[in-house]
Amino acid sequence: MKPTIFVHTNEKQIVGAIVSKYSFERFAADPSAFEVKLIETAKYDWMNDYEGRLYLRDGLKRQWLNEDLQSFTVLRFAPPELMNYQGRSLVVDPDVFCISNVNELLIRDMKGKSLMARHRRGTKESVWASSVMLLDNPKLTSWNVRRNFEEMFEFKRDYMKWITLLLEPQDSIGELEPVWNDFDTLTPETRMIHNTKRQTQPWKSGLPVDFRAPESKNALTPKNIYNRVRRTLFGEYGMMGTYKTHPDPRQERLFFGLLRECFDKGLVTEAMIRHEMKHNHVRHDALDLVRRTPTLDERPLFAA
């Protein structure tokens, strides 16, 4: 069985997901050695049944919104089941782009670990970044995304503990080097760049913010009080401002260079991008940027 790379997404991030999928194939030494597939929330109809219901997140009870920018994150845990708990998979967010040969990661010796991810220091404790995970599927038979999702609404499973892998046996997790999930850092050593700072994602600049503000467990903090009042008066995304320009022009050029190549190969069309712009999923000057951004062959990423 070939290893499979899964890019999970919702409709708001579908363009990023398509570019992400292409990036793995583009830079691979042997693209035929693996498959790349999208996991889309639109194909998980049962998620709609939970719209507006309360679930457990970081000790608080919050409403589930399928339209949120990151509603896809729970689908990070779907690949083992999708592969019938066989073989090996790699799952990434739709804002993760490969700029190196992924083949070497897919065949890495996992030293008996069930999964590998980047370790990071959270605001409260040391956690794992599940946005990029290398998975040994036969060792993850306890992962059932629908059952585990339902547990959040029964208040048995905390979303934040789930997503940061704190519910996994910690000795079953191996550590990936940061370059395989480089948070908004792009250097010649980067293997996968992750535009994790949502407000500066290069394809969103200028659009109204459509992601939910975080809340901490301490409900009486000024930040929590402000966000609750703001939501009550102006709606979920009211007064959240707009997406900003990414501070690193090279990261913007990477995305639109890859998108240009997707155009050239027929993977995306002008009609699709216009549809995404109309729905504020992609910045309104995206087509202009595609036309004037060179491909990565025409201008290599780290060219002077």
Image: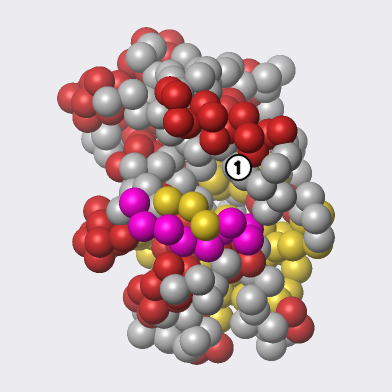
Q: Residue at x 68, y 34 (%)?
A: 223
Q: Is residue 179 left or right of residue 133?
A: right
Between 13 and 125, the residue placed more toward the observer is 125
Q: Residue at x 60, y 42 (%)?
A: 214
Question: Secondary structure beneath disc 1?
Answer: loop
Which image quadrant is residue 127 in?
bottom right
Which residue type carries mark 1? Pro
Q: Is residue 116 left or right of residue 65?
A: right
Residue 97 pos. (x, y %): 53, 44
Q: Residue at x 69, y 83 (%)?
A: 169
Establish if 178 lies above or below 257: below
Q: Is residue 266 left or right of residue 65?
A: left
| Magenta highlight on residue 13 | no
Residue 224 pos. (x, y %): 64, 38
Which image quadrant is residue 286 in?
top left
Establish if 297 lies above or below 122: above
Q: Magenta residues, as a range?
A: 52-60
Residue 112 pos. (x, y %): 69, 88
Q: Quadrant of the N terminus?
A: bottom left
Q: Residue at x 70, y 42 (%)?
A: 220
Between 130 and 287, the residue placed more toward the observer is 130
Q: Which residue is mark 1?
A: 214
Q: Residue furthest left?
A: 271
